[in-house]
Structures are given as C-alpha cells and as structure tokens.
C-alpha cells in the first residue's frame, strides 16, 4: 500500500471514529470507558496520519 493510500485509509478511519464518538456522546447514557477508548483510537490514528503526512511533504 502506498503512503497516499495509507493516508486516505487513515483519514476515513479517523472520520469513522469521530462519527462513532459523536453518536455515543449524543446519548446521556454513554459508557465512559467506550468514549475514552474511541478518543484514544482517534488520537492514535491522528498521530500516525501526522507522521505519514510529514514524510510526504
């Protein structure tokens, strides 16, 4: 997989995690552990994206 394809895949994953997080937070009964896990995953994806984008630039 090329770096550009990996970046595209990570951007889609980041957007998906954002949507899941927003949906979860819309419910007052949101599980705090699940929210924390999604935020952690989202941050990991963002960090990997930043590294890859720095290599492409």
Image (cartoon, rainbow, N blue to C red):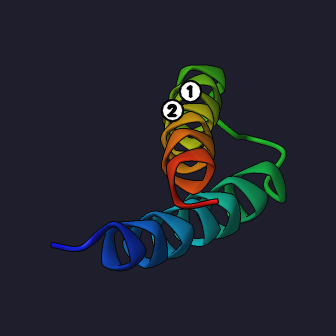
- Quarter of the image for the N terminus: give it: bottom left
In the rendered image, the residue lying farthest to the front is: 57
* Rendered view: 23 above or below 34: below
Residue at the spot 55% in from the left edge and 20% down from the top edge: 33
Q: Quadrant of residue 17?
A: bottom right
* Residue in the foreground of this view, choosing between 18 and 8: 8
Q: Nearer the viewer, mark 1 or mark 2?
A: 2
Q: Secondary structure at mark 1?
A: helix
Residue at the spot 46% in from the left edge and 65% down from the top edge: 13
User: How many badges with numbers are in the image?
Assistant: 2
* Residue in the foreground of this view, choosing between 48 and 37: 48
> In the image, 53: left or right of 25?
left
Residue 26, image x and y in percent?
84, 59
Q: Residues within 10 Å of mark 1 (few under 14, many from 20)?
A: few
- Quarter of the image for the C terminus: give it: bottom right
Which residue is labeled 2 in the image? 44
Do tag 1 and tag 2 residues touch (Cβ < 8 Å)? yes
Residue at the spot 56% in from the left edge and 27% down from the top edge: 40
* Residue in the foreground of this view, choosing between 47 and 52: 52
Which residue is labeled 1 in the image? 40
* Rendered view: 44 above or below 24: above
In the rendered image, the residue lying farthest to the left is: 1
> In the image, 40: left or right of 28?
left
Residue at the spot 80% in from the left edge and 50% down from the top edge: 25
Residue 7, image x and y in percent?
46, 67
* Rendered view: 54 above or below 33: below
Q: Secondary structure at mark 2?
A: helix
């Amino acid at each position: 997989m090329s770096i550009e394809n990996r970046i595209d895949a990570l951007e889609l994953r980041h957007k998906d995690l954002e949507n899941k997080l927003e949906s979860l937070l819309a419910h007052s009964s949101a599980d705090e552990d699940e929210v924390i896990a999604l935020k952690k995953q989202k941050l990991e994806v963002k960090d990997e994206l930043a590294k890859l984008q720095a290599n492409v630039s």
